[in-house]
Amino acid sequence: MAAPPNSTTFSGDVWAELRLADARDVPHIHRLIHQMAEFELLTDLFAATEELLTSTLFPSPTPPPFTSFTALILDLSPSPIVPDSSSTIASRRLDLSASPLTDPEAAAFASPRGGGRVTAGFVICFPNYSTFLSKPGLYVEDIFVRAPWRRRGLGRMMLSAVAGRAAELGMGRVEWCVLDWNKNAIDFYEGMGADVLPQWRICRLAGAALDKYKGSQEEAAGGKAAE
Amino acid sequence: MAAPPNSTTFSGDVWAELRLADARDVPHIHRLIHQMAEFELLTDLFAATEELLTSTLFPSPTPPPFTSFTALILDLSPSPIVPDSSSTIASRRLDLSASPLTDPEAAAFASPRGGGRVTAGFVICFPNYSTFLSKPGLYVEDIFVRAPWRRRGLGRMMLSAVAGRAAELGMGRVEWCVLDWNKNAIDFYEGMGADVLPQWRICRLAGAALDKYKGSQEEAAGGKAAE
């Protein structure tokens, strides 16, 4: 079967780079988030826009990585990566000679870094805080690899690199969430040494249920609640 | 029955203030975190120290509240609170005339603000990020009220004030976690309009399982994994 138009077939050696994202990556990040929402059967919650992603992930000045909201991009390159100390988080070679890979969206996900690179995934993470440890940790909000690039060790590379950076920064924990029906993901995370905590549940106030609290503390602070 | 020594009995009107914490509150925060660990049957995870709390919660300069790790203190005062726009988050009057309250730890928890105030609880929160909304939210790591002050509406006051501030800051969500056996807490949160999400589980890499990733991305970035 011929590959679809605009697809690219990768074979032999390709090079993966996990790097800091910048504002030029926003269109790809936006579409990757939508693909993730589809995978998680949660498109009803998808409300991301390129404008909001730009202003919230890449404010001016952008804080140092891992001190606030941090976006990382996974690029695959047909030629060796020259690591850039200011943006490369991790890089590795993939040997696809035994199993070439066709990426039907290679053209749509051409990396803004050029050189025939394609963007294949992303990570969003930010510091959290453990009072029991009285230390910052790192919370991984998203880690996503596009379908054709899965099962090649790239998710492991991404999570290992983020965990390594957190450990080196003296952080006490790396945490993230998983859907309880996503057995593949749970097995993968446990294989990497993570505990899946059975007892904790996430509580969420959002939308109208959150908006109704607007002004509640100003009334209280202003003394109305005390009258 | 006589109240124990060093206890204080509060009756009639008392005034509650939720305010920004500062470094003088660290000894009380440390002891409140330990009480919370006891309540959650998690003292084996307790490793907080006053030194770490000070350096992580009150760095110099301390970022504006709700833009990074933010600690709030609940003080109860025998005299009316004069709200301070630089630190008061919410305040209200409590009428204890129908049910006076004895605080056996009132002396140990004397507020550093003086005036006969006692510290009765705390909140730790920090920004998180929703990619689906492409907006920051607020994550409430801890919300705790000492035992004698519970069931007086103070937890509601604290969570309402934090939610109100998040809504006014344009944040998309307020989230926190609850233990699945803590039915009182779950009922309380649902009564405040929160959803308790059944499907998500927290994954955690910590301690030795985290440390083993140290240096992993440097090797990869240096090209060893590509050789």
Image (cartoon, coloured by chain):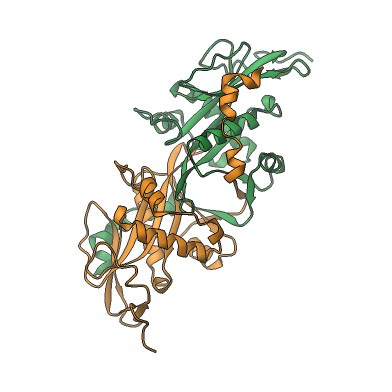
Chain colours: A orange, B green
Residue B98: name its quadrant: top right
* Residue visible at 59% across and 30% down in the picture: A216
* Residue visible at 63% across and 20% down in the picture: A224
In screen coordinates, is A82 left or right of A204?
left
* Extreme residue in the bottom direction: A1
Quadrant where the C terminus of chain B sits is: bottom left
Relative depth, front residue between A51 and B64: A51
Q: Residue B27: x, y in percent?
A: 50, 24
* Above or below, comparing residue A84 to residue B179 in the picture: below
In screen coordinates, is B165 left or right of B10?
left
In screen coordinates, is A74 left or right of B89?
left
Residue B120 visible? The answer is no
* Above or below, comparing residue B34 to residue A93 in the picture: above
Residue A200 visible? The answer is yes
Q: Residue B193: x, y in percent?
A: 66, 42
Q: Residue A183: x, y in percent?
A: 56, 66
* Above or below, comparing residue A149 to residue B71 in the picture: below
* Residue visible at 25% across and 64% down in the picture: B224
Q: Residue B195: x, y in percent?
A: 64, 48
In screen coordinates, is B70 left or right of B155?
left
Relative depth, front residue between A32 and A93: A32
